[in-house]
């Protein structure tokens, strides 16, 4: 598992980073539009991005 | 209890990076997740507040990341052409003394770069140069990190000092003298620390004269310029004076005579052109009003509504971080990178497929750093919006009473550590420090000077900055090692500001 993570570290970092920076603006717009369900889903993506980096070295 | 909870995410990041030697990306993720849980469970964060905080954090992250990405790009453009290697090979012709090299490049040149550049640029530019000169990657990151902290407040063309004035509504004439004095003294001691980091106490003793001369000249000139009302170019002018003084000093401390081969002046000029272009463009943008105005016409600006926690902590409505699309330091670095590429290509320094290699190299280096910055900035902004940062500062101030002048620089340092920025720390804590000083009867200007000096000096320890330096020197994933080295030097410098603060308050009270 460690070897796999090391081998794919760049891909994992990229995915984690995208999950951290892509959702905030749509999340803000969703809240402005009163769509709480979508906002929760987008917050979950940000959390997922941060969970992903925990697996890195 | 709230104080301990508010401290927990920051303490956790410190423990994971310094104690367990985790990389910044991992520790940042852990800190963010912990802060989110505590903010929601104990400080009353709600979905609307989190949405606003994350959107603001995105703007703040982009503000920082644009500079980092472009700084790496400039570095890769120069490195791919072989310019870094050429500069590294040429510097021993000025001096072979490694301690003197550390002072000239890691202290004086770092202060100059901080004067004209901004976030992380001195470390990102200098660390690879020092590696090229034979310094270990760890030392190569530590030296410019310590070396530029004293010049942050009056560097970046005064943005941190402007932020202090804006946050407190006090005039620069009142704040500049104590701030420049504290930072000048810290700058002098910084020179000794740089010498120590490069070769231990023997090097400090051997290079005491250049350290004293350079420290007095740079700190003195920064003081005169800042007190004269030109605080936006204090570090820049101090840095230039230091660079001019370096030539005779480097000749005197030239080290062991070694055969360094012939110096190819034309090749060196071409190699340096990438960085000369950067300096010319930055000066042009900052000092020519017409150019500055033209580039700052397009601004990315979002107005955010007021948000409140379920416990009543209120963050007023206002604009988030504004990003000037064409005048941003990152954009300026991008223009420099493109021009430098054209110069090196015209000189025939690139191999085929160089562009691909430059872009791939840049992406591989910045991605892990970008993830850590995104998570740490989000953590800091969430903490600020739910009152965790406020709780921390108030807890520190209220429990200290008469010792508040001693604690004041540490509050600034805490803010800079969390946000990675002297400017942000001044924005977050400036007004709080001012009100607490007034309540406790301490001179406000001295307390605010302690705030900005502590923040500037400790900003070099911020994980976001450490990540930048570590990445450029090939230390990615070993940021914890860098922090362990930096923590002692930075802690001592902030401690000196604490002592200066207490002494100044005492002198002010004695003199009536």
Image (cartoon, rainbow, N blue to C red):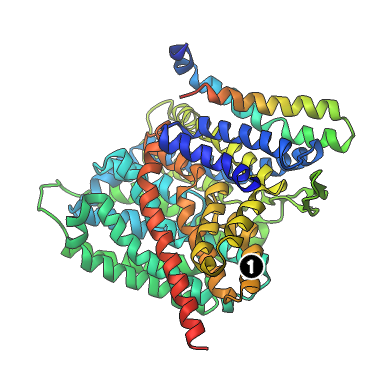
Q: Is residue A16 visible?
A: yes
Q: B454 or B162, which is in the foreground?
A: B454
Q: Residue at x 48, y 65 (%)?
A: B406
Residue B243 falls left or right of residue B114: left
Residue B258 falls left or right of residue B384: left
Vertical relation: B377 (above or below) B233: above
Q: Chain of mark 1?
A: B
Q: Residue furthest bottom?
A: B512
On the image, the x and y values in percent for residue B8 come to: 57, 40
On the image, the x and y values in percent for residue B197 come to: 28, 51
Vertical relation: B15 (above or below) B226: above
Query: Considering the numbered disc 1 on the image, is that residue within a helix, a strand or a loop?
Result: helix
Vertical relation: B431 (above or below) B428: below
On the image, the x and y values in percent for residue B101 come to: 25, 54
Q: B127 or B507, which is in the foreground?
A: B507
Q: B399 or B193, which is in the foreground?
A: B399
Q: Which residue is mark 1?
A: B436
Q: Is residue B248 visible?
A: no
Q: Residues within 10 Å of mark 1 (few under 14, many from 20)?
A: some
The picture quadrant where one finds residue B254 is bottom left
The picture quadrant where one finds residue B52 is top right
On the image, the x and y values in percent for residue B193 come to: 30, 57
Q: Residue at x 79, y 27 (%)?
A: A40
Q: Residue furthest right?
A: A34
Q: Residue at x 17, y 56 (%)?
A: B202
The N terminus of chain B lies in which quarter of the figure? top right
Q: How many marks?
A: 1
Residue A40 falls left or right of residue B495: right
């Amino acid at each position: 598992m460690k070897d796999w993570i090391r081998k794919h570290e760049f891909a994992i970092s990229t995915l984690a980073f995208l999950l951290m920076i892509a959702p905030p603006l749509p999340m803000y717009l969703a809240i402005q539009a009163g769509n709480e369900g979508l906002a929760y889903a987008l917050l979950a993506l940000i959390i997922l991005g941060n969970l992903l980096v925990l697996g890195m070295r | 209890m709230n104080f301990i909870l508010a401290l927990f995410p920051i303490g956790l990041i410190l423990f994971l990076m310094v104690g367990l030697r985790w990389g910044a990306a991992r520790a940042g993720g852990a800190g963010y997740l912990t802060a989110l849980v505590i903010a929601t469970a104990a400080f009353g964060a709600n979905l609307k507040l989190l949405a606003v905080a994350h959107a603001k954090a995105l703007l703040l992250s982009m503000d920082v990341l644009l500079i980092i990405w472009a700084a790496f790009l400039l570095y890769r453009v120069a490195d791919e052409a072989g310019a870094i290697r050429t500069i590294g090979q040429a510097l021993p012709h000025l001096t072979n003394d490694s301690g003197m090299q550390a002072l000239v490049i890691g202290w004086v040149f770092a202060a100059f770069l901080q004067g004209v550049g901004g976030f992380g640029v001195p470390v990102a530019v200098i660390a690879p140069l020092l590696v090229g000169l034979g310094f270990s990657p760890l030392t190569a990151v530590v030296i410019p990190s310590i070396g530029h902290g004293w010049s942050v407040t009056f560097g970046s063309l005064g943005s941190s000092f402007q932020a202090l004035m804006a946050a407190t509504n006090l005039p620069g004439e009142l704040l500049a003298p104590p701030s420049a004095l504290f930072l000048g003294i810290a700058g002098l001691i910084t020179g000794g620390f740089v010498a120590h980091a490069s070769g231990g106490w023997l090097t400090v003793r051997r290079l005491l004269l250049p350290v004293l001369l350079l420290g007095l000249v740079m700190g003195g000139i920064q003081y005169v310029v800042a007190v004269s009302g030109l605080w936006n170019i204090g570090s820049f002018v101090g840095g230039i004076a230091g660079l001019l003084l370096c030539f005779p000093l480097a000749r005197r401390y030239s080290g062991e005579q070694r055969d360094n081969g012939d110096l190819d002046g034309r090749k060196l000029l071409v190699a340096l052109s990438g960085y000369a272009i950067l300096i010319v463009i930055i000066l042009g943008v900052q000092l020519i009003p017409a150019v500055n105005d033209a580039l700052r016409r397009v601004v990315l600006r979002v107005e955010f509504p007021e948000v409140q926690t379920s416990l009543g902590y209120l963050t007023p409505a206002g604009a988030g971080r504004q990003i000037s699309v064409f005048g941003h330091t990152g954009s300026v670095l991008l223009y420099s990178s493109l021009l430098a590429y054209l110069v090196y290509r015209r000189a025939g320094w690139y191999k085929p497929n160089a562009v691909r290699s430059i872009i791939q190299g840049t992406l591989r280096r910045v991605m892990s750093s970008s993830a850590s910055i995104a998570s740490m900035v989000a953590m800091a902004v969430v903490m600020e919006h739910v009152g965790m940062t406020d709780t921390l500062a108030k807890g520190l101030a209220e429990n200290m009473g008469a010792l508040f002048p001693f604690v004041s620089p540490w509050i600034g340092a805490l803010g800079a550590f969390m946000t990675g920025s002297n400017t942000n720390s001044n924005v977050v804590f400036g007004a709080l420090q001012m009100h607490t000083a007034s309540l406790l009867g301490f001179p406000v200007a001295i307390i605010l000077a302690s705030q900005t000096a502590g923040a500037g000096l400790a900003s070099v320890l911020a994980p976001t900055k450490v990540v930048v330096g570590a990445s450029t020197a090939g230390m990615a994933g070993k940021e914890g090692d860098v922090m362990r080295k930096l923590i002692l030097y930075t802690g001592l410098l902030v401690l000196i500001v604490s002592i200066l603060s207490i002494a100044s308050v005492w002198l002010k009270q004695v003199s009536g």
